[in-house]
Image: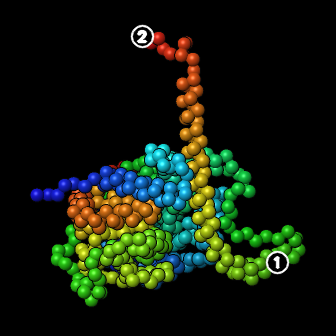
Amino acid sequence: MKLACVVHRFGADIAGGSEAHCRHVAEHLAVEHDVTVLTSCARDHITWRNEHAAGASTLGALKVLRFPASRERSLHRFAEVSELAFSGAAGESVQEDWFRENGPNLPGLLEHLRTHGGEYDAILFWAFRYAEVYFGLPHVRERAILVPTAEEDPVIRMPLLERFFALPAGYIFLTPEEQELVERRMSTATPPSCIIGSGLDPAPPGPGADLAALGLRDPFLLYLGRIDPNKGCADLLAHFTRFKAEHEGPVKLVMAGPASMPLPSHPDIRYLGFVDEPTRDALLRRAVMLAMPSRYESLSLVLLEAWNHGLPAVVNGHCAVLKGQALRANGALYYRNYDEFARCVSVLLERPEAARQLGAQGLAYVEQEYRWPTVIRKIDALLATIAGRSPA
Amino acid sequence: MSAMPVEVDKLMREIEDDVRHMRRKRLLARGGAGDYRDPVLYARVDETLRRAIEARDHDALLLPDFLTGEADWDLSLHLKYASHRPVVGTALIAVKRRVLLPLMRWLYEFSLENFRKQRRINTVLFACIEELAIENARLRQAIQGSERPVSGSAPGPGA
């Protein structure tokens, strides 16, 4: 089949969740299909500044077509429109302005969809909140498959999305909770869809990188990812600091990832900054549990990675997706406040057998649901359905 | 031999029971409501409030729906600049935008997160009130049902 994947940024060096998800799915689809990625010239998702050259290039088996953004994002205007759009009383034009200001505005990509959209058997769109998806998908709705990557945040409550969510010919969801969230915003029955999560390769064998140089001592809780208040990190730091004040023991917190918030100094908290893949693997092998404090997730790839290494986790129970993943896999405990956080951490520290078993159950769940052949089989079945229905 | 499976659901019930017990003891030690000496009663209160916070869809609450359209209850988080002066109004708005806005924005962004927290607290309180109102209505129905005269209302044999 001839397929297109539409995504706001693309490249091996781009770390964003939906961008990485798109790249991995596109690379695996390219084994059997002719796949073209339609994207921007941006590296930076804040400004959408054109940094890559516009036009055609290749990345492995993928063809990549880049289109320049007509303007950079004005954060000031975006903040103003966001306040209006999420006030609960915004009209449709203000809501559409929000998508325009969020960007990236890629007139060339929209023109390509208008003029060449019919040449693809199916076109997959990643992340409904970006302008090129919101304004581009309606041009090719009969062959469009939306990967919404929806989260329980104010954007999903915009009234005009009810009409937008009725447009795609098919959906790829990351979790049952995400599907339910999007379906609550739909006025029509859900078109053909599948739930794929994300594919993972088995964790590399061996202990991974030598962590001695980092001076880490066991046992430690691990946080992996952007250190940001929006990811629940302020709560995690507050919870852990209080936990250490109230409980004796050697346990530490290790946070690995770029920081976008002030990092309080504490003798039992280590910040490693960005870490490479071998270090990441070694941390996941050595940690006693993963902490996942985010409230807004459409799928936690880090949680799947932890289970891929047989590591149990404590996750934010206010996030329906994380709680759902924890229960389905039988691989993580969940908390909704400090008391539950402290008890969950204590249980996993005091009962190492149960902790190991939770990690093993998480790994079994990944084996069953998230290996690439399983994921690609589900997408292929959906593609066959959509391609069979759309006009030639 | 493989280890015994661990059920997260079961383990979480155990953790939640531990936390409930700990919190009740802490509240009583601080002089909380004496009614909480009864653990069954405390568990019911805990369950009701928890249901309000977690199970209710906070986007579909009755009380905010009653108040929709009344601007004086909703927290408005948007900075608006306007002038009632017909002639110099445009110039005044331009000054406000260029001079006042940058100053105001700092203060605004400083307090915005607190406004958002207040909005979340308001929503949780609305949910709690709604949960109590539903429970109250159910209890009234149950009491009215039990107060009905037995003769004439109960179905006869074979009904």
Residue A137 position, x and y percent, is: 47, 60
> Where is residue A231 shown, x and y percent of the image?
45, 70
To the question of a shared chain for discs 2 and 1, the answer is yes
A18 lies above or below B96: above
* Residue A293 in which image quadrant: bottom left
To which residue does mark 1 refer? B92
Q: Which residue lies furthest to the left in this view?
A: B1
Residue toward you, A207 or A83: A207
- Residue A90, image x, y percentages: 65, 59
Of tags 2 and 1, which is closer to the observer?
A: 2
Residue at image coords 88%, 74%: B87
Q: Residue at x 60, y 72 (%)?
A: A78
Q: In the rendered image of this protein, does residue A287 appear above or below residue B61?
A: below
Can you see residue B138? yes
Q: Please report whichever mark, 2 or 1, sits nearer to the chain's N-terminal start.
A: 1
Looking at the rendered image, the quarter that the C terminus of chain B falls into is: top left
Residue at label 2? B158
Q: In terms of depth relative to the viewer, which is nearer, A239 or A41?
A: A239
Q: Residue lying furthest top in this view?
A: B157
